[in-house]
Image: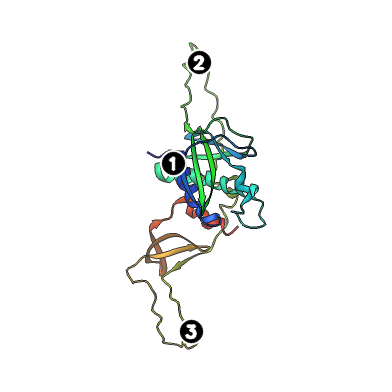
Amino acid sequence: MKNYMDCWTQVATDLFQQALAGEPELADALPKPFSAGSFGFVASITGDVEGRFAIVLDASILETPLLGEGTDQKAGWGELLQETINAAAGELLAQTGTKCRAEKFEESSGEAKVTRAFQLKSGDRSWTIMVRDEVRASKPAAVAAPGPAASAPAPPAPPVPTLSPGLTPGLELLLDVELEASLRFGCREMPLGEILDLGPGDVVQLDRHVSDPVDLIVGDKIVARGEVVLVNGNFGLRVTEVAAPRKRLESIRCLF
């Protein structure tokens, strides 16, 4: 069964290729001593699994604008790594049903031990990324044995609101915001001349067969696929495929 570390590795591999210039690859590597100027971030994970999850990067990674020219590279890495932390929680929920979230994410001064090391490769350059994973299954709460003269039970505590797995507190505030979703039946590239010649009665053939699933689009991302149905005289979508939580989160992130 996958654990939090496995999910983080999978998510980081995908997001680094999407977000970093040159689409670098993340691969396992041997740990090595931290170099001067290394920097990192640490998250506190709570839920069905809990503990610290720290990521340390080689200082030389700041010399290359992997996050784009004119970008504060260190701050950008903090945002990207926080996104991997949150998305890994969503992936863990999707893969195993285990619920957790990042309660805190902050800059770290360094780590004394390493659980796993990676090499981020782009062309002929590479950088070391080291991870310390202390996320483990939560211990069940101890149940006190009743005394000889137990008093009346205390009234139950009011429920504590919890965040959805994999979402930051800021994004949680947006869960009630309505987003525009649309269905895409297919597409086709056409010369401008053909478009200008279109008239009533003309038929434009799309690149999708009538039996193929249609796409549910939020922003510019596909979040689900399914088949078209009729609901009270209106078109509807019966969902047959849903994108992984981190992909759905990415579709929302691009709008804000």
Dot 3 amino acid type: Ile
Name the residue at the front extreme.
124
* Pointer 3 residue: 195
Give coordinates of residue 143: x percent, y percent.
47, 21
Instruction: Label 2: state its secondary structure.
Output: loop
Give coordinates of residue 192: x percent, y percent.
50, 83
Q: CA distance from mark 2 to mark 3?
A: 82 Å
- Comparing marks 1 and 3, which lies closer to the viewer? 1
- Comparing marks 2 and 3, which lies closer to the viewer? 3
Location of residue 39 with respect to 190 vertically, above or below: above
Name the residue at the left extreme.
211
Question: In the image, is 70 to the left or to the right of 145?
Answer: right
Q: Quarter holding the N terminus?
A: top left
Instruction: Label 3: state its secondary structure.
Output: helix
* Pointer 1 residue: 6
Give coordinates of residue 87: x percent, y percent.
50, 47
Location of residue 172 with respect to 131 vertically, above or below: below
Q: Residue at x 40, y 40 (%)?
A: 2
Mark before the other along the chain sequence, 1 or 3 = 1
Q: CA distance from mark 1 to mark 3?
A: 49 Å
* Pointer 2 residue: 150
Dot 2 amino acid type: Ala
Mark before the other along the chain sequence, 2 or 3 = 2
Callout 1 crowding tier (Cα within 10 Å): few <14, some 14–19, many ≥20: few
Dot 1 amino acid type: Asp
- Comparing marks 2 and 1, which lies closer to the viewer? 1
Q: Residue at x 47, y 16 (%)?
A: 146
Question: In the image, is 238 to the left or to the right of 217?
Answer: left
Q: How many numbered badges does the structure rendering display?
A: 3
